[in-house]
Image: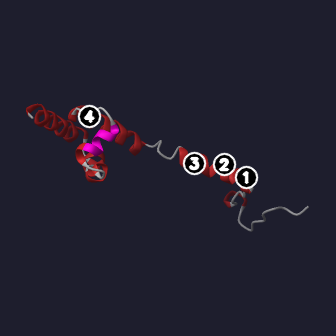
Amino acid sequence: MPPAYVSKKPRECRQVERDRKSAKLWSKHNREFAWVSEGGTLRRKRVCELAEALGIVDYEEFQECYGPRWAYHAREQILHMKEDEWQKYLNTLKAITDAC
């Protein structure tokens, strides 16, 4: 029986061919766990802190209060602020919401 995949590349550089069933399972699970990353973890942590600062209890409440694209508009602050800047930002938001 001939091999399913023959490569002329050196042994270290060969690609592995999977059958269609295992490839579908692999890609399905790859998509399911793609959110487990350093950036994703930071984003979830900061969204939680932001919700606490604003007094928001439910994720849908963000949409009700700040519109359906709130995450897009707050992306820069959530992901790219340094930790000390983020804490100052949260304290400012807490002070504003407490005053209202």
**Residue under the image location 64 percent in, 49 percent down:** 26
Check contact, mark 4 vs mark 1: CB within 8 A. Answer: no
Residue labelled with disc 3: 30
Side of 60 relative to 31 (left or right): left
Q: Quadrant of residue 6?
A: bottom right
Q: Magenta stretch? A: 59-64
Q: Please give the name of the residue rendered at 54% of the width and 45% of the height, measured from the top-left corner.
A: 32
Q: Residues within 10 Å of mark 2 (few under 14, many from 20)?
A: few
Report the residue marked by disc 1. Answer: 21
Residue flagged by tag 4: what amino acid is it?
Ile
Mark 4 and mark 2 residues within 8 Å of each other at the beta carbon: no
Magenta stretch holds residue 68: no
**Contact flag, marks 1 and 2 (Cβ < 8 Å):** yes
The residue identified by callout 2 is 25
Of label 3 and label 2, which has the lower sequence position?
A: 2
Q: Secondary structure at mark 2?
A: helix
Judging from the image, what secondary structure is the residue with disc 1 in? helix
Q: Is residue 74 above or below residue 17?
A: above
Going from N to C along the chain, the mark reached first, 3 or 1, is 1
